[in-house]
Every structure is written in C-alpha cells, then in structure tokens.
Image: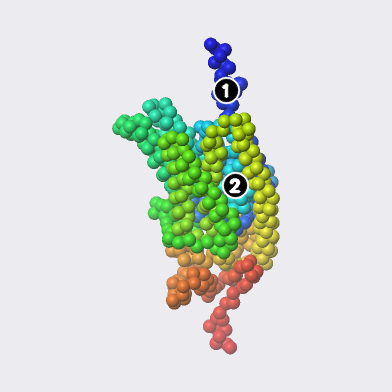
C-alpha cells in the first residue's frame, strides 16, 4: 500500500511538497534578477524628466518628496542608493537603479500572480505553465512606458510591485478560505493582509482602489464559508488593523522631517500635524480631480503603448472571470477586475499632464489573467496538450520581436536624457558667480540643487520654482530670509477672461520673477533649457540714477 501511494505522489524529490506542475519560486526569482539587469542597463547615468531629479535628491539625502511623501520608498531607497553610491555609482544613477529593483520585484510577483490564478486550471505541464507565466512578464518588460518607470527614479515600479504582490497574497488567502482555513482562526494571514494594505497606503493613495475591493472579496469569502461569528470577526479586524499600523507608522518619519528638513525637502510641507496631514493626504492635488489632461507627448504614449495594452488586459480579466469554474474563483477574478477598473477610472478623471504611468497597474493586473485563459479548456489527447506551450512560445517570440524597436526607444531615451543633462550642466556653469536667484520653472529644477550638493557649484545661488512661491508657507519662509514677499499680488497677474491655462500660468510665473527682481538686491536669472537661455533680468534704475539723468 505504501509503495502504491508513493507511485501516485506528485511531489518532487527532496520533500519540498512542490507538485510536478508547479513552477518553483526560484525560477521566478531568476527571471526577476534577469529583468533587474535589463532595466538597470537601460537606466541613464543622469536624472530624467518628470520627478526623477527630485527623487534622486530625496533618496540621496533621506529627505521628503512631494505628496504623499512615500516614506518607506524613501527610507529603504536611501539605504540602497547610499550602498550603490559607495561602489562608485553616481547619485542619479543609483536612484534610477532603485526603480529597476522595484521593476524586478514586480516581475517576480507578476509571474507568481499569473501562476496562482491558473494553478487550479484543467491541464498544463510545468513547462507550459512556466512559459505562460513569462508571457505577461515579457510583454510588460518591453513596453516603453514601463521601461521608463523601471529605469528612472520614480515611484511607480514599486507601486506596481506592491499591487501585484498584494494581489498574489489575495489569491492565496482566498484559496485558503475556500479550503479548510475558513473554519480556523485567521491568525497571521489576517495580520499579513493588513500589513500588505498598510504598505500600499504608506506608498501611494491609489492603493485604496486595490486594497478596498480585494478586502471586500476576502470578507465575502470568509462570511460565505464561516459566517459572521462576533468573536471571529473581532479577531480578524484586530489582526488586520494591527498589521496595517506597522507600515503606516512610517508616516511618522514625515512628521519628524517636517520640523527637521533635510537638504531635499518638499517646500510646501509645513511643520505640525496640519501640515503633515495635508502632505500625506495629497490635498495639494485634489483640485486636479475631475478632468483628463495629458500633454501632447503623453497622448502619443497613451495611443501607442497604453490603450492597446489596457484593452487586452481588460478583455483578459473579464474573460477569466466569465470562465471561472466555481463561484469562489469568480469572486477572486472579478475583484481583480474591479480593482483594475477603479484605478483606470480614477486616472481618467485625474488631470495630471503625465498619466500614462498610472495605467501600468491595471495593465499588469490584467496581463496576469492571460495564463488562466490558456488552461481553461480540457485538452484530451497528447497533441492538444502541447498547444498551450506552443501558443506561449509564439507569444514570447512576438514579445521579443516587439522588444527590438521598443527597447531601442528606451536606449534612445536614456541617451536623450544624458545629452539634455549635459546642456543643463553647461548652462548652470554659465551662471555668474555670487549670490543670485535662479528661476527654473520646471519640475526638473532639483537637478540644479544636485549640482550644488554633489559638485559644490554656485553655493550662493538660490534655485527657485516660481510656482512654489504662490504657497503661503513658501512665501513666508522666503520673506523671513530675504525681507520681502516674493509673490504679493500674484493673483492680479492672471489675465482677465483668459481660458488658456498655460498662458495664465506663464503670466503668473513671469510676474513672480519680475517682482523678486524688483524687490531684491540679488541678481535674478531666468533659466530655461528649452530655448536654451540663461537670461539676467535687468534691474530698474535707482531713484538717484534717474535724477542724475
């Protein structure tokens, strides 16, 4: 009898308990490591556009980034970039590679999520399942929007990694609830779920659109299997909250930093609880909700690399939910579809000029459903059972073909950033020595602060973004340092009846630059690499000079 049982066993040698069709985690880890090297090879040696120069400074100095602050990303990233910098890497490159590590973690969890969603399918060899787990990872890896986030200092590669890891934990917890686990105590699983949700909350506000639907689905599965016994519910809620508080406590770092700023510090962050809450809640950006306003360049990216992916992702998620073999599986897949939908709907009503990266999360969740479709139908003969592996190999070959021009886009982009940085640095070196105000009204202005901190160049210059001076706390601090309000009356500079947002913005920025120039004794320079120009603003003639004339 024992011999017969051993013959029927599907466990691998070595007592690991891994079935012959289950893909080992080490295989996924090896793929993630390869992805990390790929993304790091695409990373430029310098900061790029958007917020990468800000994050390079923040990670190097353990400072505070724009809302919502990203404390865990900053604290862990600071340790990473310091270690990489100690090997000789430049600060901007080290910060870029931190995003590559996040993308590698996302690659790992994308594979594991794809495998967990298809693990109870009808058929499939280990090789076929492994190949299919590579399909979503490969197609995401070559997408130019993704390679941009995976090779520049940004937060979205880590946000996608969190979402995929949380989704994988959700699937495994749901499977436990559907099995014998529903009658037992939630224990560490409830705590782990709370910790995962809290980790998302400490990183990015849109985590609510993932954690919320998945938590509701888990509650529904638990209620369906075990009812709503008060003691069990109370224990579960307590464990979830206890787990969530651990990562959420990292926001205390932002509260401390508000009163103890580092060299890189978000200028609008005010000390005290009110300023802290305004920062972690992202209230500064609430006015952007209600419209969709991508820049022309982002519109091109959306058309080429986001909308096609998003369509495939939603089609795959919807089909997977419809083809679910039982109600528990349908709840799991539908919850993931709802999460992807909520993130997408929010992004379509969020008026930032660079929304493409926000769609990466729903794209990744949808791509993870593809392998489950490949194994949803019974394959009776040996020839038919080879079809999933053949189909996966064909899709991987197509991804490799697409990757040839798309990865060239990533390399060309890195070269463009390096040429642009060389231009900016040469312009910065042309700034006259001595005390001055240098206005660069662009999100990349922290690049100039990097030259001051890391190269020791122009230490007497004060680098400013004119828009920041419309903030009361920034104006107050400026006035305390220099003795005058830099933006008094800026509202009057808005053109009457004007509807062009860019024209109104430029009018206000020009007003602030001119006011600082008229009120202060320091030289004021208009710094604009887009032209390019470093223009010294002329001072008005003094009253004595005017009388002499």
- Is residue 277 visible in the rendered image? The answer is yes
Crowding around mark 1 (Cα neighbors within 10 Å: few <14, some 14 to 19, many 20+) is: some
Residue identifier under label 2:
140
Query: In the picture shown, does residue 506 fall above or below 370?
Result: below
Say which element carries label 2: helix
Q: Residue at x 62, y 40 (%)?
A: 392
Q: CA distance from mark 2 to mark 1?
A: 32 Å
Q: Residue at x 57, y 16 (%)?
A: 6
Q: Nearer the viewer, residue 337 or 4?
A: 4
Q: Nearer the viewer, residue 432 or 543?
A: 432
Say which element carries label 1: loop
Q: Which mark is residue 11?
A: 1
- Is residue 28 visible in the rendered image? The answer is no
Query: In the picture shown, does residue 508 fall above or below 49?
Result: below
Q: Nearer the viewer, residue 426 or 67?
A: 67
Residue 47 in percent (x, y) is at 63, 55
Residue 146 in percent (x, y) is at 59, 50
- Quadrant for the C terminus in the image: bottom right
Query: In the picture shown, does residue 208 fall above or below 388?
Result: below
Using residue 251 as the reference point, say whether residue 437 is left or right of it: right
Crowding around mark 2 (Cα neighbors within 10 Å: few <14, some 14 to 19, many 20+) is: many
Q: Residue at x 51, y 48 (%)?
A: 315
Residue 393 in percent (x, y) is at 65, 40
Query: In the picture shown, does residue 296 fall above or below 101?
Result: below
- Which corner quadrant of the image does residue 161 belong to? top right
Q: Earlier in the sequence, mark 2 or mark 1?
A: 1
Q: How many marks?
A: 2
Residue 56 in percent (x, y) is at 59, 52
Using residue 17 as the reference point, say whether residue 472 is left or right of it: left
Q: Residue at x 57, y 87 (%)?
A: 548
């Amino acid at each position: 009898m024992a011999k017969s049982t051993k013959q029927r066993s599907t466990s691998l040698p070595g007592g690991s308990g891994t079935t012959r069709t289950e893909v080992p985690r080490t295989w996924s880890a090896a793929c993630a490591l390869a992805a990390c090297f790929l993304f790091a090879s695409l990373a430029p040696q310098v900061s790029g556009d958007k917020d990468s120069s800000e994050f390079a400074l923040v990670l190097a100095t353990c400072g505070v980034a724009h809302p919502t602050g990203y404390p865990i990303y900053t604290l862990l990233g600071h340790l990473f970039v310091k270690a990489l910098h100690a090997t000789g890497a430049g600060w901007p490159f080290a910060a870029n590679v931190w995003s590559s590590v996040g993308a590698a973690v996302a690659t790992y969890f994308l594979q594991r999520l794809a495998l967990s969603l298809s693990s109870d399918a009808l058929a499939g060899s280990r090789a076929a399942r492994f190949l299919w787990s590579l399909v979503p990872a490969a197609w995401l890896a070559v997408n130019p929007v993704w390679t941009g986030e995976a090779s520049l200092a940004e937060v979205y590669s880590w946000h996608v990694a969190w979402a995929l890891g949380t989704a994988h934990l959700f699937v495994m917890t749901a499977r436990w609830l559907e099995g014998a686990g529903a009658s037992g105590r939630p224990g560490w699983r409830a705590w782990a779920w709370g910790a995962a949700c809290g980790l998302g909350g400490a990183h990015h506000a849109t985590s609510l659109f993932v954690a919320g639907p998945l938590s509701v689905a888990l509650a529904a599965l638990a209620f369906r299997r075990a009812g709503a016994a008060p003691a069990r519910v109370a224990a579960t809620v307590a464990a979830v909250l206890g787990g969530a508080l651990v990562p959420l406590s990292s926001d205390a770092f932002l509260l401390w930093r508000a009163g103890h700023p580092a060299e890189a510090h978000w200028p609008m962050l005010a000390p005290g609880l009110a300023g802290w809450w305004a920062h972690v809640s992202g209230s500064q950006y609430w006015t952007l909700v209600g419209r969709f306003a991508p820049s022309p360049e982002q519109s091109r990216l959306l058309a080429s690399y986001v909308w096609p992916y998003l369509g495939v992702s939603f089609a795959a998620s919807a089909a997977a939910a419809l083809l679910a073999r039982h109600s528990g599986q349908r709840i799991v897949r539908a919850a993931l579809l709802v999460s992807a939908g909520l993130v997408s709907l929010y992004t379509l009503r969020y008026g930032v000029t660079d929304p493409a990266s926000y769609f990466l999360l729903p794209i990744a969740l949808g791509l993870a459903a593809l392998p489950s479709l490949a194994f949803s139908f019974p394959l009776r003969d040996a020839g038919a059972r080879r079809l999933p592996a053949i189909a996966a190999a064909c899709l991987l070959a197509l991804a490799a073909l697409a990757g040839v021009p798309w990865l060239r886009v990533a390399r060309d982009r890195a070269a463009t950033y390096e040429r642009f940085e060389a231009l900016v640095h040469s312009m910065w070196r042309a700034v006259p020595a001595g005390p001055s105000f240098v206005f660069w009204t662009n999100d990349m202005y922290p690049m100039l602060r990097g030259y001051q901190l890391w190269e020791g160049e122009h230490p007497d210059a004060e680098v400013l973004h004119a828009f920041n001076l419309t903030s009361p706390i920034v104006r107050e601090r400026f006035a305390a340092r220099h003795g005058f309000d830099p933006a008094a009356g800026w509202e009057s500079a808005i053109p009457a009846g004007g509807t062009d947002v860019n024209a109104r913005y430029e009018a206000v920025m020009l007003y602030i630059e001119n006011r600082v120039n008229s009120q202060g004794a320091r030289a004021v320079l208009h710094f604009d690499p887009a032209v390019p120009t470093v223009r010294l603003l002329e001072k008005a003639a003094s009253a004595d000079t005017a009388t002499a004339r």
